[in-house]
Image (cartoon, rainbow, N blue to C red):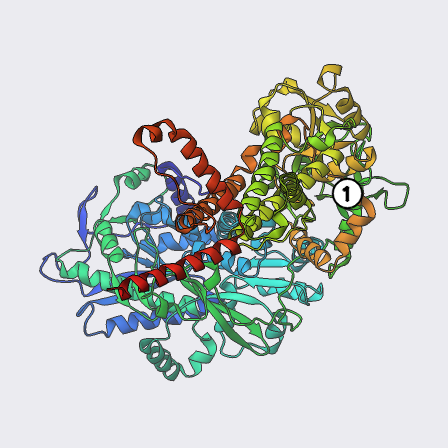
Amino acid sequence: MLMMMTRVEILLVFCMCVMVVQVIPMAVKGKTGNTTVSRSPSSSSSRMPSVVNVGALFTVNSVIGRSVKPAVAAAVDDVNNSPTVLRGVALNLIQHDTNCSGFLGTIEALQLMENDVVAAIGPQSSGIAHVISHVVNELQVPLLSFGATDPTLSSLQYPYFIRTTHNDYHQMSAITDLVLHFDWKEIIAIFVDDDYGRNGISALGDTLANKRARISYKASFTPGASLANVTELLTKVNLMECRVYVVHVNPDTGLNIFHVAKKLGMLTSGYVWVTTDWLPAVLDSSELPDDDTMDLIQGVVSLRQHTTNSVIKKEFLKKWKSKQGNERKQTTSFNSYALYAYDSVWVLAHALDKFLKAGERITFSYDPNIRRTNSTDIQLSSLRVFNEGNKLLEMIRDTRFVGLTGEVKFDEDKNLVHPAYDVINIGGTGVRTVGYWSNHSGLSVDSPESLYGKRMNRSSADQRLYSIIWPGETSDKPRGWVFPNNGKPLRVAVPYRHSYKEVVTKDKSTQGVRGYCIDVFEAAVSLLPYAVPRKYILYGDGRMNPSYNSLVNAVAENKYDAAVGDVTITTNRTRIVDFTQPYMESGLVVVVAVKAAKPTPWAFLKPFTIQMWLVTGGFFIFVGSVVWILEHRLNHEFRGPPSQQVMTIFWFSFSTMFFSHRENTVSTLGRMVLILWLFVVLIINSSYTASLTSILTVQQLTSRIEGIDSLTSSNEPIGVQDGTFAYNYLVRDLQIAESRIKPLRGEEEYANALRLGPKGGGVAAIVDELPYVELFMRYTKCEFRIVGQEFTKSGWGFAFQRDSPLAVDLSTAILQLSENGELQRIHDKWLAAPSCSTQATDVEESSSLSLGNFWGLFLICGVACFISLSIFFGRMLCQYRQFTPDEEEPHEVLEPDSQTRRGRPSRLVSFRDLMDFYDKKDAEIKEVLRRNRREARRESGEHSGSP
């Protein structure tokens, strides 16, 4: 947080500084008071000043200062020699050394302001920038900082502070993406405890938290800390679990971290070191870093402010090297801060050029608030306000050009657009770029400039880096954590249950616990590529089942590191802890009491209803009669005396029930009817057999509950296991009254409550998870039954604190156990039970098969019989009309009145003739018809031959 300073506090700072340096007021032309004084050669507004004072603030004797000083001087020379910018106006650079001190830096800044500078380049320190920003705010002098990266400097509290480098907020976003790219969830931040370090790490914590990662420990040290203090700090850090270190320190003392880490063996395999841009600033400041320095930072990954590899940058570096000669060797090379400092001078030059071309004058005036202090012994009259400072500030913010670093343009928050960083990896004797980061595309192997024209894409699938050589000269990604070396084992809470001890319970062994869950956990841990020291701690007293919600909360509150047991994975629990992959599938089911069916001698009639029996028997007779009608004229097996033919009909009909009929069918229509009827008989036989088997073997329910829906709609009491999530699920999710729910402790209470039933003070049903119910079935030898389906789907998992890497590794181990069959073997060892029929039915009349189940079959068979009979009788009538018996005598011609009296006997004789015709064999009828046709042809020939 920034310290808010009032105007009085600012004046107090001024007073302290003036008392130290004894500022002597300069002689000023003009009137005293709030007087406007022109510093230009002429008071005429038509002429530009020939010289404009520009200040520079940086620590000369520092990594950044040694590189920035010649860069700023070169930029001023280039501006003064430029034919396009500030023609006829020279920049007069006034440099002051801040000595890397906030107090001395403030003094130097006040001394600089005495020279009526229109702007100041610097400082490089965020801490000094905080203090000086109050000064420039009062004097309205723009401050262009190339090195103050503290994110809090972008606040509205500092309107005259312009950052000409990238904000650390973006750098911390890049580190966050880098950490998550390798699936690390925790880091340890090592930083200097000043404004630069604290606020940068605070930004890192925010960006990590936004992506469900965190800083597990903040290791801070004071500026200028001794090697002993650093050693003590890193020794403490080395005892911790996390092995991913982010180092955010000053370039001048940053290598001390790696000197100590080298001695402590913290630069070996398994460690991850990531630094901010201070390390490349050190390396880039000299053309050839010494071998000792490179040996310290092998495998380190760092970020460097990205600058475009443009032509103007190459030409500038070439010109600079050729110009410096011996001075180049003394002042070292340019790092990225020097390039941003160079562009800062050009930002001011472009803004001043626009400012002066707009006809603005450079004038200063006394601040009456400062002048009032002259009543004391402290003299501040030499400090004056730049009257046009706000106008120049606006022109600076609107400046846009292409510099050595790339496109220079400010956004609405006064930050440079297109923040980007190089991701570098130190290996061997050099530095290798393994990728880039930008706020446009995240991590990529393509340069940011090539991606700005494309659609913004920050998806994790498109984040790429080249391979990295980590400490220990390995390309394998470090795990990022180990078990701490502080002698503390993993604190594993184990529920001490009253019931179902096969799952997990107390044991007298050295381990202290045993059960299915413990064996699964031990088998999974054995597959991990590292040792896991652990200590099992019983949770509960064993007299009652513990509350599993309380157990999970204890893990979330850091009372335990993990919970191993039959912990069900629920939505609410996943919000506070991390679970492994489920090692046991689970779900809630309903268990009810059943009773054995009483034996009855008439049980064989129960598969069908009375109506079904009557219709089936009727169809047997009907189909037998139809087949007899269709076969009687053709098949001798269907002929004979009437009594024999009746017996044939009944025998044939019922023998089809067993497919044992002896009579063959010869007519096409008869065969068609028989085939359809045999199909119907097959279906009826199969259904009868299945229904009868079910009736004779199944048990009957003692209640009407058939699943969770009927249980919810009833008002009968429900039993649940004490301590599990089933109670909350029934009350909160299914809205069942709490008065209906009865907590039970285990198998014995389950069985007693179900046997008593609701009327005897027990329960109508038990709602519990399937693994417990299977054990309960084994205990009661399948005395009870599960009804309905599982109405929840979940599983058991091991619970860990949020973002624990063990949860991920154990999930992988559980999958391996499942694939190699070990998980099933452990299950069979502890939980295997004889399978019980999970079906129970209420055997009543309503469960018998009715006509409604088969009316479609009967309809098809009846229609087929009707069609066959229609075809048969149609053909028979046609034959009857053509048939004339050769034995028949000519009939006597009757009078009309006698015909009337004998009309009825004539019709009876005709029906009798038809039946006689039907009773004749088909072969005889066909023979008579052929003979009649021959006689008809002969008679026709005789009539045609007579005269």
At mark 1, the secondary structure is: loop
**Residue in the image at 54% along x and 43% along y:** 626
Q: Nearer the viewer, residue 456 or 116?
A: 456
Q: Amino acid at mark 1?
A: Ser
Instruction: Residue 757: give x, y in percent of width and height.
Output: 74, 20
Residue 479, horizontal then vertical, whole percent: 65, 61
**Which image quadrant: the C terminus?**
bottom left
Report whether 157 appears left or right of 811. Answer: left
Looking at the picture, tell me which residue is in the foreground, 71 or 546. 546
Residue 577 screen position, x and y as percent = 63, 42
Left or right: residue 833 compared with residue 644: right
Q: Quadrant of residue 380?
A: top left
Determine whether, in the image, residue 318 is placed left or right of residue 751.
left
Specify whether 372 is left or right of 722.
Answer: left
Residue, disc 1: 835
Which quarter of the figure has residue 344? bottom left
Binning the other alpha carbons within 10 Å of mark 1 as few (below 14), some (14 to 19) or many (20 upward) gives few
> Which residue is pictured at 59% across the width and 74% down the height?
294
| Residue 684 picture location, percent across and down | 62, 41
Q: Residue at x 76, y 50 (%)?
A: 520
Q: Is residue 885 above or below residue 166?
A: above
